[in-house]
Image (tube, rainbow, N blue to C red):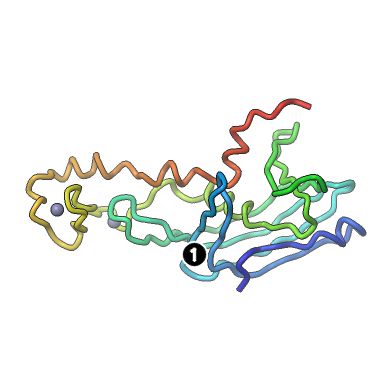
Amino acid sequence: MTDSPHIHLGSLLRTSADAHAEGELDHLSYEQGGQQQTLRFAEPAPYEVDVNALGGQEMYLQGHFEPTLVMDCARCLRDVEVPLELKLGTLLRYDPAVDAPYLEEADTGEEVLVFGDPDLDLSAYLAETTLLAAPLSVLHAPDCKGLCQVCGHDLNEGQCEHMAQVPVEEIDDELGTPEGSAHARQTPFAALRDLQLPED
Ligand SMILES: [Zn+2]
Ligand SMILES: [Zn+2]
């Protein structure tokens, strides 16, 4: 079990030998907006990546990642398991001046993961790919009744004294809007996507 997925690209950079890495993750930690975030997985999530040299400082990463992401039910917040099968594929560019890996859009419109440490930490890239593939919000059951807006009681487990005052339609309107939706799209590279980088 690896906590932080890495692929070692030092010898690829020296000799153009292909690189390979695989392992299993029980969670993914990554930084987003200066804060440490964690994606939880219901079971060890297997990943496998291959990197091929393209010449110069460029290379291509491909592989797959199969996490069972644990998300909160949008209405009652209990855990919901979301199995994902992700195909990985991105250009890489080595730039020794770069501190933390970031995604950049090439002239061709393709995304390029730019990195500076030959021991490439794939955490942010895998988290980004996972979050972009995950649904914005999930319900643990289609008819989830949500939480009482007054006392927070889980209405799936029966009514509370306030239930009579809260029509079901209103629950759907109020709680059906997943609070997680904004959060779910705050992916590791989201801030960078929004940055207006000066042309050079
Ligand atoms: Zn629920
Ligand atoms: Zn209540």
Q: Is residue 11 above or below residue 190?
A: below
Q: Residue at x 46, y 67 (%)?
A: 42
Count of marks, rendered view:
1
Query: Could you say whether the residue bearing mark 1 is in a helix, strand or loop?
Result: strand
Q: Name the image quarter holding residue 66.
A: bottom right
Amino acid type at image mark 1: Phe
Q: Residue at x 58, y 55 (%)?
A: 30
Out of 95 and 127, give the one closest to the viewer.
Answer: 95
| Side of 10 relative to 133 (left or right) | right
Residue 174: percent from left, percent from top: 25, 41
Q: Residue at x 65, y 53 (%)?
A: 88
Q: Residue at x 72, y 26 (%)?
A: 198
Residue most extreme to the top = 199
Out of 152 and 50, give the one closest to the viewer.
Answer: 152
Residue 32: percent from left, percent from top: 56, 47
Residue 48: percent from left, percent from top: 67, 64
Quadrant of the snapshot with the C terminus: top right
Q: Please give the residue where the numbered disc 1 appears in the rendered image.
A: 41
Residue 14: percent from left, percent from top: 91, 58
Mark 1: few/some/many CA within 10 Å (<14, 14-19, 20+): many
| Side of 120 relative to 124 (left or right) | right
